[in-house]
Amino acid sequence: MLRDGEVFRDDHLPDPIVGRNRHMNEVTDALAPIEDGFRAENVFLFGPSGVGKTTVAKAAVRELRREVLEVPYAYVNCWQDHTRNRVLDQIARGLVGATLPRSSSTSRLIDLIKSNLHGPGVVILDEADQLRGTEVLYDLHEIRGLSWIGIANREIDLFADLDDRITSRISVAYRVRFDTYGEDTITEILSRRARDGLGPGAVNDDVLARIARLSEGDARQAITALRVAVRMASQEGLAAIPERLVEDAVRNAEQEVRQKTISKLNTHQRALHEVLVEAEGGLIQKELYARYEERHDDPVTLRYLRENHLPKLEHYNLIEVEWDRGTKRYSLVGVDHSESTPEL
DNA sequence: CGTCCACGGGAATTGATGGACT
DNA sequence: AGTCCATCAATTCCCGTGGACG
């Protein structure tokens, strides 16, 4: 049944992309000056997860490189590389193909990029709301020819803590909002993936529409669910996905994504997660910290937890936070305490 | 009010790394 | 080879602010 598994990977970049024509046009417009050898306009993309922001950004750069060969570009995920130095390091590697020793000073990196970039270049700053400081945006502005595509969940002010006189010199010409996909668009996306990656007749439209409905506008979840459904059907020796498997597939896909996330947590985040697994109904911050501190043999301070690990768990959609008259309550996401799951 | 909980600015410390100087 | 200094990231420490509540 499965012909090409690559189609279902997270990093698969479809060609062409589905259901985001307007967004694509905005981004390609912003990049258009590069075709004449000029610096592009900066773009800012925002919207919830799983709605194609990263895909559009990457696809727009791909389009550009079809027009203008070898435009240098770099992709930076600011969740992993959120300091000024790391961002510039990534850019130096991606943009000018620099092979660097383990660490280089910030000014050295800037010089390196400047002296190796001749003409326009593009940087994708994914998860840009995770940048520690925004100083790096100023650095990028200082590099002739360089422009960026910023991506974030919410429409944030990237320049909030920059000087006004600096801000006035940096512009974001395009702000593109991504709304949640409709069911029909998700169905269309799934249909393309099925066509490209599965044997003929492996799924029918009803199955795809059903997956789309249960995935609540999140394309990533939907695609994962389809992949899980394929696997489940294959294990039963079937050549097509029966409709009865869909609900379980969607549920398993959620579980699979969650499990994968948990496996990537560090010891502090894991300790927090474990504490919350055991705590029914959630905990207030102070309690949570007290129990974390007991469980971990080298605990970090509450301050650090609050600034780093807790927001991260929240971003991974593992925990949720709720204000309750001056105190915060942390609890696990997607765990239904009201219902005990029977074995098998 | 006083207390509890939580937020967050800002300075300080620690530790790794790498380059310059001797 | 040995010492010293700069840079940077990670983490902690100190402390003032503010809301909710009794």
Image (cartoon, coloured by chain):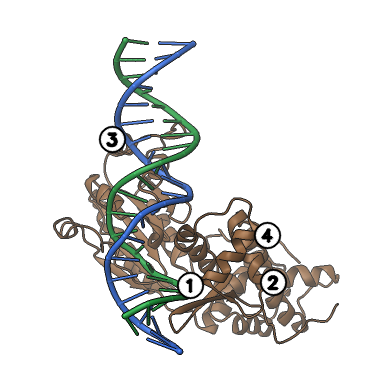
Chain colours: A brown, B green, C blue
Q: Earlier in the sequence, mark 2 or mark 4?
A: 4
Q: Chain of mark 2?
A: A
- Residue A15 appears anywhere in the view: no
Residue that mark 4 sits on = A5
Q: Quadrant of the N terminus of chain A?
A: bottom right
Q: Are marks 2 and 3 on the same chain?
A: yes
Image disc number at residue A278: 2
Q: Is residue A26 above or below residue A34?
A: below
Look at the image and tell me whether residue A117 can be seen.
Answer: yes
Asked if both marks, 1 and 2, belong to the same chain, the answer given is yes
Q: CA distance from mark 1 to mark 3?
A: 36 Å
Marks 1 and 2, how far apart at CA: 33 Å
Per the image, label 4 sits on a secondary structure element best described as: helix
Q: Nearer the viewer, residue A278 or B18?
A: A278
CA neighbours of label 3 inside 10 A, class few (<14), some (14 to 19), many (20+)? few
Q: Secondary structure at mark 3?
A: helix
| Contact, mark 4 vs mark 1 (Cβ under 8 Å) | no
Q: Which residue is mark 1?
A: A51
- Mark 3 sits on what residue? A111
Are the residues under marks 3 and 4 on the same chain? yes
Camera-nearest residue between A28 and A305: A305
Q: Secondary structure at mark 1?
A: loop
Q: Which of the chains bears the disc numbered 1?
A: A
- Residue count near mark 1 (Cα–Cα under 10 Å), binned few <14, some 14–19, many ≥20: many
Q: Earlier in the sequence, mark 3 or mark 4?
A: 4
In the rendered image, residue A328, in percent from the top left (x then y), is placed at 49, 76
